[in-house]
Structure formats: C-alpha cells, structure tokens
C-alpha cells in the first residue's frame, strides 16, 4: 500500500513537490510508492501550475493533519501560523513531517522536536536551509563524525544577488534593490532578506546541527546589508576583498575542550579575501563551508531557493522517511528508542552563545573627517588606548570637503573596538563614520 | 551489545578510522555503540600511529571476515587482491562492508553488489570517491529525486596540485611532478594519478550512481596530463581558460527521453572558462558538480584524499549501517526486500557508453608550422572539409624557426576532428601538433 502524503500548500514549493512526485521519468522505486493523498490550499478556484484531481484539494488543513490515511505531512505554506500549529497537530496524530519552513524551525524546533521524539515520528528539514543543496542530511550523516569548528555560509540568495550586482555595476544598494524587486529576485517587503533575518534563521538551524545543541534565535546577532555602499565595495576591492553577507557559527577558539557549546552565531556583511572559497559564490547561489576535524574544509554549493531546488529537497526528505519505514516494516509511529538516529533530532540542551562584545574579529571602518592636521594621529591614539591594534590607516580621497579615511584593524575584541568608535564619534574633526564592517 | 568492526588494514586510512572511533570527544551516541573487534595487518611488529590493544591485531585477514563476532568489515587495505576476495567472503558470511577501495568498486561492483543483495547486507563506499566530501550518500538520497544530466568533477588531488603549480609558476610538467613526489603529493609510480586512471575509477562509480546503471570500466575514455605544457597553460590563460583534469559523465543530449543509459563517461584535461565553478578549485582540493532537474547546479567541494577526510567518510558509513541496524532491531542479514533502499545499491542493468568518435565537443589544438604562406588557409580548408567549424585561428608566436598556431573549434564531432587532424599531420608545412585538448 502506497505511502500517503498530505501536502499543506500548493504555492511555488508545493507545486514543485507535486510535479516531482507525478513525474513518470523519475523511476526510483521509492517514488512509485508515494502517493499524494490530500492537498490543502487557501482557495479551490485558483489556477494551479500542476494538474491534480480536484477531489484531492481541500481548504480544511486541520482535516489533513488528523486524517488517519495520511502517513506524512508536508508543510510548505510558510509563515509562523498556522504552520507551527499544523505541524504540532500532525505530530500529535502520529504523522511524520517534512517542512521547508526555516522560520518555524528556527523558532520552535525545541517544542517540535520534543513532540516528535515523544510521538516517535520524524521531522525532516532539508528544504529549510539552502534549497536544493544537500546540507542537512550530510550534516547529520557524513559530517556527524567530525568535530566541527566553524560553519560559514552565504545562505540568502536575494542579498547575494544584490551584492553581486552592486560589485559588478558599481551601483548603490537602493537602485539594485529596486531593480531586484522589479525582476522578482527580491520581495515587495525585503526586510527578512536584506536585514539578515532569513539568514539568521538558517544559521541557527545549521549551528544547532553542527554543534549538537539548541540555539535561541534572539541570541543570534544579525546585521543586514542596507548600509553597504558602492564606495565600500570599491575600497574593499582595492584591499583585495569582496563583501558578502555571511552567516557564521563557530566554536569559541578559547573555549575549553569540554565546553562544546560556547558558540558565536552571527549574520553580518563581511569582507572576504578574494581567494576564499566563498568569495566566488555569486548571484542567487548559496554555499556553506564547514571546517572540522578530521575532515578539513567541505563546501556545499548550489541554488538556495526556487521551486525546483526546494522541491528536490522536500521530496528527498519524503523518500528518506519512506525508505526507513519500509526497512523497519512499520509505518506507524516508532518508539522513541527505535528512531533512526541519523534522521531524528537527538540533542536537547541549549548552546551558550557568546555576547558580541566578546567576539574577536578584524574590522574595516570608513571615516569622513575634516582635513585637520593630526586627525589620523588622534584616531590611532584612541584605538591604541582601547587595545585596538591597527593593520592600516589610509586616506583614500576626498568626499565634498571631507577627507575619507579607511582603517583596517588586526583581531580585536568587539567591545573594545565599539568603545573606541564611540569616543571617536565625539572628536571635533570626525564628521561621520559611514561604515563599520567585519573582515575575515 | 556493541557493534563489532573488523578493520582490514591499519595504514593511513585505517589508523585514521581507528582514531575517530577511539576519540572521546566524538559524542554521537552511535559511535559509542561501535567497537573495534579485530584489526588485520600485514606485520604485527610495525609501529602504529594509533594505540590499540595488542590482542586486537592479527595477520590472519581471512579469520576476520569469517569471524561470527564481527558485524561490519571495513576494508582499507587498497589494491585489487586480496581486497576483492576478502570483501566477497565477508559478504558471504553475512557481514556488512565499508570500503574505501575505488579500484575494486569500479571493477567489481557488479559481483560485489549482486552478492550483497543476495546476502541482504550493505556495502558502503562513501570513502571510495573524493575522500571526506559527502558525495555518495547525497547522490543516493538528496539528489536521487532528480534527473541528472551531467556530473563533472576534479576528483584527483595529485593532478590538480600539479596543474595548479604549473599555472602559478609557469613550470613544466616534469619539474612539478618531481617536486610533488619529493613533497609526498605524488607517488613514486605516479601512473594511476597522472594518466587519469584513478579519476576514471571514480567517475565510473559516480556515473553509475547518478544515472542508475552499471558502467564497464574499460569503456571509460581516459587521458592524463603528461602532455600538458607550460605553453598550453599560458595560451589557455590568454584565451580566458584554466586547464583542469576533468572527469565527466553525461547523458547524451541527443538521446531520446527513454534512453536513460546513453552516456558519455570520460577523463581528460579540459580548458575551463575561468568563471566556471570548478575553475577556482585548486591545489589538492576536489570538487564535483552535478547538473540536474529540478535541482539545477549543485557542487560539493573539499579534500579528496588523506587520512582524516577519508576516515571521516569511512566512519560515517559505519554509522549509517549501525543506525539502520538499530532502527530495524536486527543485526543479522536482512532479506533483500527489507534493505534500506537509499543505502543499498538497486540497479542491475548496464549503461551504454557512446564511443568517443561520436562525442561532440570543442577543441583546442596547437600547431608548429613552417612559416609558409597559406598554411593557415590549408588548415582552415581541411577542417572545413571535415565539418569542423573554427572559432579562432591565431598565430601566437614563433618557437625556434616554427610558427606557433592555436586553433579553437566550435562544437564538433570528435571523429571528424580526428580525421582532419590526421590529414593535417601529413601536410608538408606542419612540423608538429604538440597539443590537442578539449574545451568546455
């Protein structure tokens, strides 16, 4: 008897998922045992890009997640509610769940995975991070034997597209954003993308899997790309860097060996050396770089969004569940002890996230100063007073009547750097500090 | 009761595997249930980089693969025999097998997977291709819902290291090879690497998984990098290309939709546009690019060899087997029907490989000609007579008394190009054709 899918949502990803499941060219024997049982939609009248029998469609999503004939609920409606409640209700009714919902997983993974563990069902989330790039299962399986030190990724296609075009065209943020919206690469309300919130959801999920502990989303530091100017991109280029919105999670290098959960988790624009593997990831492409022992560097690259890539991830999760249900010969909920440990989520404690003030990194800062004698000297002295050691201080030109000075630091404690900046902002000769960016 | 590993070989990869299994920092609950039961070595007296109780070591490898206490045999001795026989005997005795042996798998996968299927055991090969990069399991799982069009990879670290240094230093092959041997990046007998045989083994394995059919290794076209000169790398650079040893498997674009098994599978140096994702993969790094529907492009990058990365892949395979054995509650052989379909090998037919003469690609060729009037015209006419359309013909300089001419073609049938070349070789004005390379 076929495994029955209850599909919640028939938008871009839902339609892509249905297309794969209905595609006769895909001959993997597992796909042939999967059947779309019900499809929950908001309106029955809307035209659909995929041909489904009318009697599969319903607007009653609750009825799907409680339907005894449904084995696996696939949630692709997005948003926090009713997605979260439907997922929880599906779990409570013994359904396995596949979801592409990074927002829900980043915020409610604790209650969702606790419920799944109690109910003995799988909750699969490959599609929630980086679309079609296999990253969640490789983290759970191939990389799980490693001690991961750092996860670093370009995980938001919209901002990468904007930054790539800014770099290629020498254009400023607002102009490229407007064009990206016109072309459909950015949403009408671009907040979640350009302010880094979407990337924060994703790095929270990746960090949780890479470091084996739960992450509280509000503790993830998040800074977007609105303040990046064409000038910064040009100066970065001259210094040998590209600017990317990086999502980073790393184990504090200073943490003792047994403190596996002292982490930095943060999203912010970063100056990356041009030779870095992530520096050449352009346009809407995503890539995630893992560094661990003993595997070294591993990078996974591909399309991070879109109907096809995301649906590919959704269906691979469905297949994974069906394969394990077939192998164990039981489609009803498992006892917790019998769950497949490379598919189930097994950690329950929370990681400790270091406050940003304690994070050590390099900085790039651009100052506009009245061209007074001694202003570079006063900057240098003030940074020195706060233990901020400088790699270079360069006056790169003039803007109106103001001298433009770019400072690059060595590794410094963020708190010290911020204190020095606050003092410098009060200097008579300093008109403005238009940009402060981190350097890898 | 712990799952017992019989480790065949305690060289680089074997020692790395033992190190991971004995590392107390790796807390994945699955690793704690894995125990090294026996270790087969050639000599008991050799000093080892890893500390193992002396009574685990034995020189009787046959006794390991028949030992009723061993659940999983890990073969990391390499070479064809006795590796192949030991693997088959282990399977016959109901052991699951993990192997890093690309040479055995590329040649004997048919008998090995047939035997495994009959015995109801798993044979896992993540470590056989591209070391620590998760590629076999992502192919079986995440990407298996896609229709793959092309797999293209840099899968041999030694040749990539040599080509990278040749490009950086403007050096010739022999000098860099000698230095690579001195530094341990190339073996004393470099044949398997520099002649492309190792890459051929790997692309045969990848093609088999990507296209769901068996590949006969002798049908894989294979050309190494010995003929690449500093001059070719420099000319390629001027034309906007880098030269990489590429392993490629693709579905014939002209094949009808139901001919899933009309493939090209080949290894040869290739001129890659500098903007191509694989072009910036340098040094000993490997990367594999998949193109498929609906996922689009996916690239997996990392260290393709070495103790740590390869051992990471071996242990992840062991974990995968233990996870499924625990989930199914049985460590004895499964019935074939109950094998987990995303771990087991399920295809049995053979793919049809197109002969190279029929392959269509672009070519780069360098000619040394006596500077006679009309030689370019005669080249052009001869290529035209054989339906070889040229993109550019450039005289790039002189070498001794000879004019050096570089020709780049459009897409042409290889057979036609070869016939034209044979004719041109007979031209009075043509002294030599030092290089003929394919262009992507």
Image (cartoon, coloured by chain):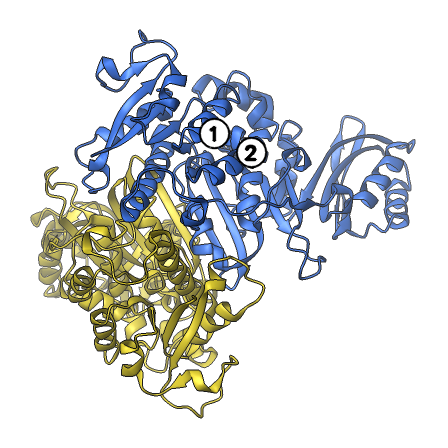
Chain colours: A blue, B yellow
Residue, disc 2: A111
Direction from residue A36 to residue B303 in the image, left or right:
right
**Residue B216 to residue B339: above or below:** below
Q: Dot 2, how many residues are within 10 Å of its Cα: few (below 14), some (14-19), or many (20+)? A: few
Q: Label 2's element?
A: helix
Which residue is at a point 8% across and 58% down the rendered structure image? B419
Given the image, what chain letter belongs to the residue carrying mark 1?
A: A
**Mark 1 or mark 2: which is in front?**
2
Residue, disc 1: A101
x, y (%) of residue B274? 40, 49
x, y (%) of residue A316? 33, 40
Looking at this view, name the residue that lies furthest to the top. A45
Which residue is at a point 50% across and 63% down the rendered structure image? B32
Which residue is at a point 34% across and 52% down the rendered structure image? B137
Looking at this view, name the residue that lies furthest to the bottom. B45
Which residue is at a point 11% across and 47% down the rendered structure image? B384
| Res B192 quadrant in image | bottom left
Direction from residue A297 to residue A3 in the image, left or right:
left
Q: Label 1's element?
A: loop
**Residue A366 to residue B417: above or below:** above
Seen from the viewer's position, the closer of residues A209 and A152 is A209
Please identify the quadrant where the N terminus of chain B is shown: bottom left
Residue B418 is tagged as none
């Amino acid at each position: 008897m076929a495994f029955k899918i209850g599909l919640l949502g028939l938008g871009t990803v839902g339609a892509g998922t249905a297309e794969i499941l209905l595609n006769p060219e895909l001959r993997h024997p597992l796909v042939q045992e999967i059947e779309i049982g019900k499809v929950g939609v908001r309106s029955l009248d809307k035209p659909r890009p995929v041909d489904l029998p009318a009697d599969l469609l319903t607007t009653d999503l609750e009825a799907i997640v409680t339907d005894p004939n449904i084995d696996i609920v696939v949630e692709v409606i997005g948003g926090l509610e009713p997605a979260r409640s439907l997922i929880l209700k599906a779990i409570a009714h013994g359904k396995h769940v596949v979801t592409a919902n990074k927002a829900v997983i980043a915020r409610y993974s604790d209650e969702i995975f606790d419920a799944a563990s109690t109910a003995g069902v799988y909750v699969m989330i490959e599609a929630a991070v980086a679309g079609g790039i296999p990253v969640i299962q490789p983290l759970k399986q191939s990389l799980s034997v490693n001690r991961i030190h750092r996860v670093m990724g370009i995980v938001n296609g919209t901002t990468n597209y904007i930054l790539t075009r800014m770099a290629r065209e020498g254009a400023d943020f607002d102009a490229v954003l407007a064009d990206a919206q016109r072309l459909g690469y950015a949403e009408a309300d671009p907040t979640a993308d350009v302010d880094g919130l979407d990337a924060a959801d994703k790095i929270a999920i990746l960090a949780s899997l890479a470091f084996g502990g739960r992450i509280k989303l509000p503790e993830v530091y998040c800074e977007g790309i609105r303040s990046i100017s064409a000038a910064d991109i040009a100066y970065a280029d001259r210094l040998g860097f590209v600017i990317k919105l990086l999502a980073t999670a790393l184990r504090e290098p200073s943490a003792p060996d047994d403190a596996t959960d002292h982490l930095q988790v943060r999203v912010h624009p970063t100056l990356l050396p041009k030779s870095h593997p992530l520096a050449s990831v352009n346009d809407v492409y995503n890539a995630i770089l893992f560094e661990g022992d003993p595997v070294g560097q591993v990078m996974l690259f591909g399309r991070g969004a879109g109907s096809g890539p995301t649906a590919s991830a959704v269906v691979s999760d469905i297949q994974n569940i069906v394969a394990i249900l077939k192998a164990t010969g039981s489609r009803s909920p498992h006892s917790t002890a019998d769950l497949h440990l490379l598919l189930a989520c097994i950690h329950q404690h929370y990681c400790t996230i270091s406050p940003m003030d304690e994070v050590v990194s390099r900085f790039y800062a651009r100052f506009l100063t009245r061209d007074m004698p001694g202003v570079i000297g006063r900057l240098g002295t003030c940074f020195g007073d706060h233990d901020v050691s400088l790699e270079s201080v360069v006056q790169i030109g003039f803007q109106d009547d103001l001298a433009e000075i770019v400072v690059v630091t060595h590794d410094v404690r963020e708190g010290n750097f911020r204190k020095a900046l606050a003092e410098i902002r009060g200097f008579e000769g300093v008109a403005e500090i238009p940009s402060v960016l981190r350097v890898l």
